[in-house]
Image (cartoon, rainbow, N blue to C red):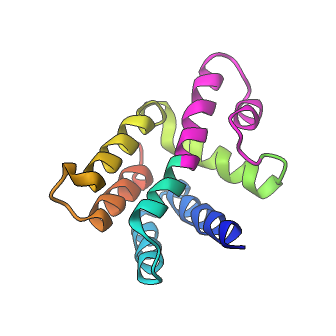
């Protein structure tokens, strides 16, 4: 049950990010942290989801359909709502940010492990905002 709850939290957070709702994503992230979620645990959930999207983007760039790429990357495409959410997230992020997901994750991870003077909370919030903002 704990694992299922963690994934539901992540899906909700990424639904907000995919909708470009950075303020709401940061507020939701704040609620999760306020409920005792550990920043590294949340970063781990970010990592799973973002690595799936990055891998799917690479496969799509090589000619795979978005659904096939998401499926091969391990995204839960057999659930229509999950598939639509992942597709929305990929469209929202766009090719440039999708190609930078590993760098963004590495930056947040390194920062949380002492590579930044910012708090883990601020690093997670910054990551959520970077992902949620429009393509500009």
User: Can you give x and y, in whole percent of width and height, for residue 72 in the image?
Assistant: 74, 32
Q: Is residue 61 magenta?
A: yes
Q: Residue at x 43, y 70 (%)?
A: 38
Q: Residue furthest top?
A: 62
Q: Quadrant of residue 70?
A: top right
| Residue 4 drawn above or below residue 109 | below
Relative horizontal placement of residue 13, taking residue 113 as reference (left or right): right
> Can the viewer see residue 136?
no
The quarter of the image holding the C terminus is top left
Identify which residue is drawn at 15% across, 58% down: 117
Q: Is residue 117 left or right of residue 18?
A: left
Q: Position of residue 82 (x, y in %)?
A: 73, 54
Which range is magenta? 48-76
Q: Is residue 102 left or right of residue 121?
A: right
The answer to whether 59 is drawn above or below residue 128 in the figure is above
The residue depicted at 55 percent of the width and 40 percent of the height is 51
């Amino acid at each position: 049950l704990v694992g299922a709850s963690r994934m539901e939290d992540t899906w909700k957070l990424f639904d907000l990010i995919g909708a470009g709702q950075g303020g709401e994503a940061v507020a939701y992230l704040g609620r999760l942290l306020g409920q005792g979620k550990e920043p590294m645990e949340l970063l781990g959930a970010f990592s799973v989801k973002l690595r799936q999207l990055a891998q799917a983007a690479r496969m799509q760039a090589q000619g795979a359909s978005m659904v096939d790429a998401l499926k091969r990357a391990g995204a839960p495409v057999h659930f229509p709502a999950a598939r639509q959410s992942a597709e929305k997230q990929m469209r929202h992020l766009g090719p440039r940010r999708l190609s930078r997901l590993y760098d963004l994750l590495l930056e947040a991870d390194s920062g949380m492990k002492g590579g930044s003077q910012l708090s883990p909370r601020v690093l997670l919030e910054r990551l959520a905002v970077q992902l949620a903002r429009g393509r500009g």
